[in-house]
Image (cartoon, rainbow, N blue to C red):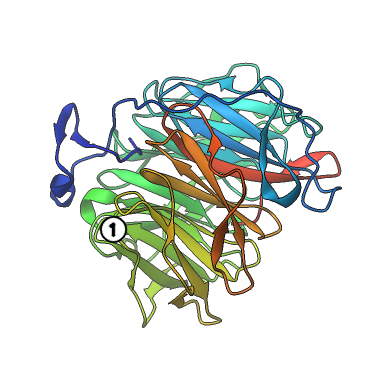
Amino acid sequence: MRPSLTIACRTTIVTLAALVSGCSNTSPYLAGGTPQLVQSHARGISGSLAEFVYVANFGSGNVSAYAIGAGGTLMPVTGSPFAAGYEPDNVAIDPEGDFAYVTNNGSNDVSVYAINASSGVLTPVAGSPFATGTNPSVAVEPNGKFAYVTNQGSNNISAYTVKASSGALTPMTGSPFNTSVQPIGLAVDPKGKFAYVACYAVSHVYAYAINPSSGALTRVNGSPFRTALYPRFVTVDPTGRYAYVTTVSGAVSAYSIATNGALKKLMRSPNEANTGPFGLVVAPNGKFVYVANYVSNNVFGYVLDSDGSLKNVPGSPFAAGSFPQKVAVDSTSKFVYVTNYSSGNVAAYAIAGNGALTQLAGSPFAAGTAPVGIATCSVTAGKCIPPPL
């Protein structure tokens, strides 16, 4: 239930203005491009670093895989796209770099793949897909031991232990864990101590402490925490000190994170994000935050100050394709990638020293039908490691 070209309350299509009523956000299929298969070896930005990008195509039921070539260009890997479930819309890569997790919004399950770090090829693991609640979205905690899935339709959080040898998911005791109405965004802090869930219908973020042994979730004192109207997605910076939330009201709410996981809104929050902010990401170097705006068809950039507050990047916002959804940054913090739902492609940008974006030659790059989720990883010691949160 993530794509946002049209807004639906269950099966009834309504106008964009209906967003403020708190209805959920499903979309019909839209036509997009089909990737052409090319050489799968990643030349990398320096000629030696291998990096890959994975995109969940909501409309075509598959995952596009790309190698990042010299200068940030995208080259589809051999065999791409790879089959997924019905309406895949979110991608997470396990912190150990072995597996990719793709939630299928329509079939209510998670497809799990082994990542070949030499070629970028995805191979389904035994037992995949694994059942979730209704309308899922996945995150894997930084130690790779546990996976969490928000179920927007069933108003809870599915929690799993991850089998290290295979990536297979086993529901943990107590799962699913209760939350509030329409949990959508989900993020785990870089130390794996806390999980944050944006609940769209109630304009709050719920915070949970993660039991380091069992993975069980316990509500943090003071949770939930108020956001601007109708939060969509949440992320945590690489230091684990700050959290950021996009909201339908056209703003990004910013918070400091206390030692117990509680959130405190920053003085200069919320920040304008343009119209229809959706996915967001903090660059791995911790210097910039980027937000995809699906109504105004652009990407807003912010400089992340030392106190966690946000300032507009010069020249922001930057043009994207039609109905941009999610955004990712490569491990070197040199390139930004944005999925364009209606255009059926991925826009790619170079990041300047001040955070400004310049679209790369050859961009946008063809994806499947209605691309939404996106994730990157870089190869280290035979593993494809994702950037820090």
Q: Residues within 10 Å of mark 1 (few under 14, many from 20)?
A: some
Looking at the image, can residue 147 be seen?
Answer: no
Rendered view: 203 above or below 369: below
Q: Residue furthest front?
A: 361
Q: Position of residue 26 (x, y in %)?
A: 28, 33
Determine which residue is flagged by label 1. Answer: 275
**Residue 63, quarter of picture:** top right
In depth, the one of 319 and 54 nearer the eye is: 319
Relative to 292, 118 lies left or right = right
Rendered view: 184 above or below 83: below
Relative to 112, 204 lies left or right = left
Q: Quadrant of the N terminus?
A: top left
In depth, the one of 140 and 163 nearer the eye is: 140
Q: Position of residue 72 (x, y in %)?
A: 68, 49
In depth, the one of 382 and 55 nearer the eye is: 55
Q: Position of residue 261 (x, y in %)?
A: 47, 66
Q: Position of residue 226 (x, y in %)?
A: 28, 65
Query: Residue placed at 60% from the left, 36% from the top?
Result: 54
Looking at the image, can residue 231 be seen?
Answer: yes
Rendered view: 125 above or below 319: above
Where disc 1 sits, the SS reads: loop
Rendered view: 240 above or below 110: below
In depth, the one of 283 and 205 nearer the eye is: 283
Relative to 354, 314 lies left or right = left
**Residue 135, quarter of picture:** top left
**Residue 149, quarter of picture:** top left
